[in-house]
Structure formats: structure tokens, C-alpha cells
Image (spheres, helix red, strand yellow):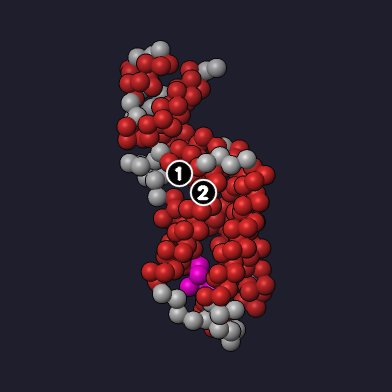
Amino acid sequence: MTTLNRIHQAAKAEFLEKGYKDASLRNIVKSVGMTTGAFYGYYKSKEELFEALVGEHYAYLLNCFQKAQKEFADLPHERQPEVMSDISGACMFDMLHYAYEHLEECKLILCCAEGTKFSGLVDVMVEIEVEGTHAYLKVLKELGRPAPQIDSTLEHILITGMFHTFFELIIHEMPLQNAENYVKEMRAFYTAGWMKIMGQ
């Protein structure tokens, strides 16, 4: 194992146990058996080290979600009601499988990132989903289908709850097969609820 790998392994253990804010760079360096000066040859700060662990995984999850939103928005309007559930479902399974392949790193993002720029993943996704929901309501109106005004507070609560429900599977490390089944059930539950609220 290279020194860099040992730093990453020690850092993951420290961050997972204590979270970013309470993690000690001194403990990480000490557990690897190196000096702080030697560590700074690899990273300039605790923040930079955390970003090295989670940055690409945060980007993957967010990009996966944004790509699905764009793919849906770019469809001909008349097709959107037909495939609404399919595209979002494929994205959720993609994110689930990716998270299980990179479980520790994704748990760092979801549970241990307070104090870093990676702590707001759910909030960012909620805002994207809210925008997507509003765009879809406009499409329904264009198509002459029911598109009732949704209370903005209720909308925010429901969307936030949906993402927290999804990420709970990863946080609690459900067996993958169980998690896949829960995603199917969760999607059925939320799809039916949204269809009802949207008058479809």
C-alpha cells in the first residue's frame, strides 16, 4: 500500500468516526506514522484531503441526477407523461448501485461532510427537482392536462423527504437486494402521490 493510500485509509476511518468538523488531522497523520510536514507534501489542508476522498463521488451522484433531469426535459412534451417514472427510476437505481460500490465515500458525503462544500447534496438535488417539477407542470398545462398549483412549502417538504428516504438506504447499509426492493416500493409510493397531487 502506498503512502497516499495509507493516508486515505486513515482519513476515511477518522472522518467516518468523527465527521469532518471533529476529525483531527494530527490523528490521521499520526496513525500513518508520518510528520505533519510530510503530509503537507500531499495535501495543503484537512479540507483538501476530504475533497480528494469524496469529490469525484459527489460529482457523479449530482451529474447522474442532473443528466436524468435534462434527458426528461429534452423529450417531446407529449412523451413526458408517459416516461416520467421510467427516467427517474433508472437514475435512482444508477445512484444506488454507484453508492454501494463506493459506500464509505458516499457515507462521508451523506453523514460526515458538515463544514465542507459537500454537505448540501440533498439541498442541491431538492432545488433541481423543484425546478423540474415546475417545468413539468407547465408541460402538463400546455398539453391541456390538469396542472394545479402546488403549495411551495408542501412541495419542498415532500421532495426533501423523498431524497432523505432514498439516502437512508445507503446510510444504513441495507443489503443491496433489499435496497433495490425498497427503491421500487418507494418509487411506486411517491409516483402515486405526485400523480394524485398533480391531478393525473
Q: Is residue 125 visible?
A: yes
Quadrant of the rendering where the N terminus is positioned: top right
Check residue 129 for magenta coloring. no
- Secondary element at tag 1: helix
In the image, 157 versus 57, the foreground residue is 157
Counting from the top left corner in percent of width and height, residue 99 is at: 57, 42
Which residues make up the magenta segment? 132-136
Counting from the top left corner in percent of width and height, residue 108 is at: 45, 38
Amino acid on which the number 1 mark rests in the picture: Leu
Seen in the image, is 99 located left or right of residue 49? right
In the figure, 194 relative to 48: above or below? below
Q: Quadrant of residue 110?
A: top left
Distance (Cα) linking label 2 and label 1: 8 Å
The earlier-in-sequence mark between 2 and 1 is: 1
In the image, 140 versus 51, the foreground residue is 140
Counting from the top left corner in percent of width and height, residue 192 is at: 60, 69
Amino acid on which the number 2 mark rests in the picture: Phe
Q: Are marks 2 and 1 in contact (CB under 8 Å)?
A: yes
Q: Which residue is mark 2?
A: 167
Q: Which mark is residue 110?
A: 1
Q: Quadrant of residue 189?
A: bottom right
User: What residue do we see at 59% from left, 67% from top?
Assistant: 191
User: What residue do we see at 40% from left, 50% from top?
Assistant: 120
Quadrant of the rendering where the C terminus is positioned: bottom right
Residue that sits furthest to the top in the current view: 33
Counting from the top left corner in percent of width and height, residue 101 is at: 61, 38
In the image, 161 versus 59, the foreground residue is 161
